[in-house]
Amino acid sequence: MFTTIQLHAEDSVAEVVLDRTPVNAVSLRMYEELTAAFRELSARTDVHAVILRSANPRMFCAGADIRETVEAVSPAESVFELRQRWARTCYEAILDCAVPTIAVVNGHALGAGAVLAGCCDIRFAAADLSIGLPEINAGRCGGARHLGRLIPQGRLRMLYFTGEPLDAEEALRLDLVQYVGKNGDELEQARTLAAKIARKSPLGLRLAKRALNESEAMGVREGYAHEQKYTIRLAQSPDAQEAASATLEKREARWSWPSNGFSVASTEAAPLVH
């Protein structure tokens, strides 16, 4: 049973909701629960898109709960060290979620909150967004490597060295967020996008997510060759034929995955299509 988050799923879209009053400070328990939730969603075959949001309309996440870092678990390991491991595990669970993820970011998203949002595939923001890495002000180093995937190095280093956050307009200009809400419609718009994504081929979404994640750190030639392995595998699936038929017949596709016997497995054994 979750105590720091909520998990809902309806019509192929799940919502993971940060719910630790008053400001969603990320405790060790929250890291553990977020990890469990995203791993569960990755394993489910009935969920095809995930929204990460806050139950607090004025606050996404104020960052890590620093009170835990001064308590000791044992003489050999502090809570701080344990938290670092769980933080990495949590962020990896979000990054590696098998289906597309959308963060809906309102109010402050600082430190760990900025990283949680940054680990999602897409970010929709409220107009009152304030997102940044203030760890320098607390004697810490933040999650720059995660945000460094998304924004230029010069701007990243300004965030890192000053601790000063970005507002919604600047975050949109830098493409750190892809949409800024109008009259508070960011969650509604994110739900519309998630539903649109969830109507795509479930197998295609999962293979596309893996192709993007695995090729991200590769060079262009190597990355494209790696992506083609997933293209080959997807082309051999019954859902690929159904996608073509639905396009030609101008109708909604009727996906058969996972009952058609195809699994989201390694592409290494996929033979070439002649």
Image (cartoon, rainbow, N blue to C red):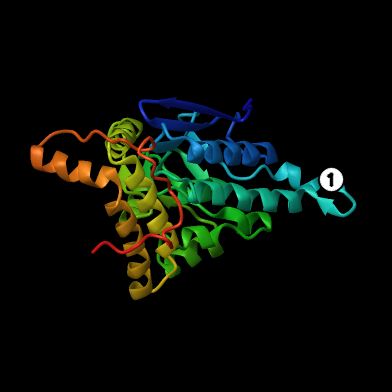
The answer to whether 17 is drawn above or below residue 111 in the figure is above
User: In the rendering, at what x and y percent does residue 37 appear?
Assistant: 55, 36
Residue 73 visible in the current orientation? yes
Res 266 quadrant in image: bottom left
Query: Residue at coordinates 74% horizontally, 50% vertically from top-left?
Result: 82
User: In the image, is 162 to the left or to the right of 229?
Assistant: right
Rendered residue at 54%/55% (across/down): 133
Q: Residues within 10 Å of mark 1 (few under 14, many from 20)?
A: few
**Which of the 4 image quarters holds residue 195?**
top left
Please tell me in which quadrant of the rendered image residue 135 appears. bottom right
Q: Position of residue 213 (x, y in %)?
A: 43, 58
Q: Please, what secondary structure does the residue beneath circle 1 have?
A: strand
Q: Quick one: 174 or 127, which is closer to the camera?
A: 174
Q: Nearer the viewer, residue 33 or 83?
A: 33
Q: Quadrant of the N terminus?
A: top right
**Residue for badge 1:** 73
Type of the residue with mark 1: Val
Residue 123's x, y, as percent? 38, 45
Q: Is residue 131 above or below residue 250?
A: below
Residue 128 spot, x, y in % from top left:
40, 39
In this picture, is 161 found above or below 116? Answer: below
Q: Which residue of the protein is positioned furthest toward the right in this rendering?
A: 75
